[in-house]
Image (cartoon, rainbow, N blue to C red):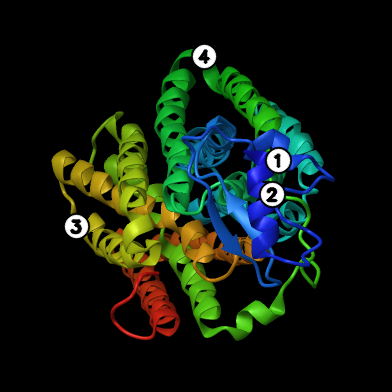
Amino acid sequence: MADANKEALERESPGTERNVGLTERRSVSERTLAAPERVHVDVEKEHDGTVVTFPDGGWPAWLVVIGACHALFATFGFVNSWGVYQQYYEETLFPDETESTIAWIGSLQYFFMFFPSLVMGRLLDLDKFQWPFRVAAIVFPVSVFLTAEVKEYYQALLAQGVLFGLAGGTLFCPAVAISGQYFRERRALAMGIVAAASSIGGVVFPVLVYNCLNRIGFKWTMRVCGFILLYATAFAAFTVRSRLPPKAVAGGILNPRAFREPSYSLYAAGSFLVMLGLYTPLTYFSYSGTELGLGSYPNYLVAIANATSLLGRIGPALIADRVGPVNIMIPGLLGSAITTFVWPVCSSKASLTAIAAVNGMFQGCFVSLLAPGVAQLGSTDDLGRRFGMISSICGFGCLIGPPISGAILADSSLHEVSYYAGCVVLAGTALMFASRWYKVGGWQGKM
């Protein structure tokens, strides 16, 4: 099978010294491409004409997806429980600090979860990401163990904001983008499954943290979480690996030429604006429930939003490969903006639960389809770098978005916070639509 693949690819790409997927230098054919007969093998040509093969299935490919799921469960799954920590820090650990000041811890988490993608995306293309990835797999749970010992605000900012975020961001980008090396026809599905793992973590950790805080205290709550994260990141470190050899793509960490394409620039700008407001409801759902006097119930609203986010990540991914990820993402973002506007109007337990569930579903749609959308804007040889640049831009949106919401809340109410968050999501949606228009050249077309 491997010999037949090699002969076929040599005929398609004569004179190409580097046949990606069949290089003898790394014996990739023996490791991943010698797939069973039942596995469909897809092909794609890179910018230099080199043929790239995609198994689009088989146990080596799905094992990598499972490993990436562990990484997303640990990183974004834990980060998505920030709303519980925000409320606990305000009421118990740092009662003298303002909402906006405490929000900086969560903002740094989100920022550093995205920003290292600028480097890790390029290292993924060069097949040099694994050592930083493995070091981060150790540092990530260690940062949680350190958070258990904090007594001052600045300590939490450094441990849970900076160190946690940097380690998580080093794991995040390769885990999201790596399945693009194994799947083409089912790429959105594979990436959607990986993204869905963060929703599972977002359900598990808020409930776990809330119940453990009341029973075993803050220190042991963080230690329990640390041991769970240690298992997840260790599993990811042993299973997430590159399939393709290093790519001879010109340039360094940045690829400024990508921004000369209007569709890519608009997509990046739209992603930034969306990230300014996307996580605002998730951050303040618990606060809303407390203001309504719902007792301990508000602590479960974050878990409910993350549970429905699972549906929003897997459902659209099932059809995105046929319809186009951006074609599905745009209606999802409109739904996210609408539910953000409606959220402060909720005046009962039932209405707040419903809006949290619906908002979580629409939020999951964007998170699941962001990376497949980037893949629509170029070839595989530069996918890691292009996704890394957009992820880093998203990081700046996550950095300043929650503190802006906190500052607005300090001077007004949740209604004004929702106006801000909903409007920036709408503006980002408009830029996403413009990106699609430039790419496909009109109303109709797959992107």
Q: Nearer the viewer, residue 65 or 101?
A: 65
Which residue carries the number 3 mark? Answer: 345
Measuring from the top left, give residue 67's x and y in whole percent.
Answer: 59, 32
Q: Quadrant of residue 296?
A: top left
From the image, state whether disc 4 or disc 1 is nearer to you. 1
Q: Is residue 363 visible?
A: yes
From the image, state whether disc 1 or disc 2 is nearer to you. 2
Which residue carries the number 4 mark? Answer: 216
**How much space separates mark 3 and mark 2, taking CA atoms?**
62 Å
> Which amino acid does the dot numbered 2 rest on?
Lys
**How much space separates mark 3 and mark 4, taking CA atoms?**
36 Å
Image vertical order of residue 150 relative to residue 7, above or below: above
Task: Name which residue lies at 38% across and 48% down.
Answer: 282
From the image, state whether disc 3 or disc 2 is nearer to you. 2
Q: Are marks 1 and 2 in contact (CB under 8 Å)?
A: yes
Image vertical order of residue 88 relative to residue 395, above or below: above
Disc 1 crowd rating (10 Å Cα; few below 14, some 14-19, many 20+) is many
> Which amino acid does the dot numbered 3 rest on?
Val
Q: Quadrant of the C terminus?
A: bottom left
* Mark with earlier residue (1, 3): 1
**How much space separates mark 1 and mark 2, taking CA atoms?**
9 Å
Which residue carries the number 2 mark? Answer: 6
* Mark carried by residue 29: 1
> Which amino acid does the dot numbered 1 rest on?
Ser
Disc 2 crowd rating (10 Å Cα; few below 14, some 14-19, many 20+) is some
Q: Quadrant of residue 175?
A: top right
Q: Is residue 67 left or right of residue 365?
A: right
Measuring from the top left, give residue 429's x and y in whole percent.
Answer: 37, 72
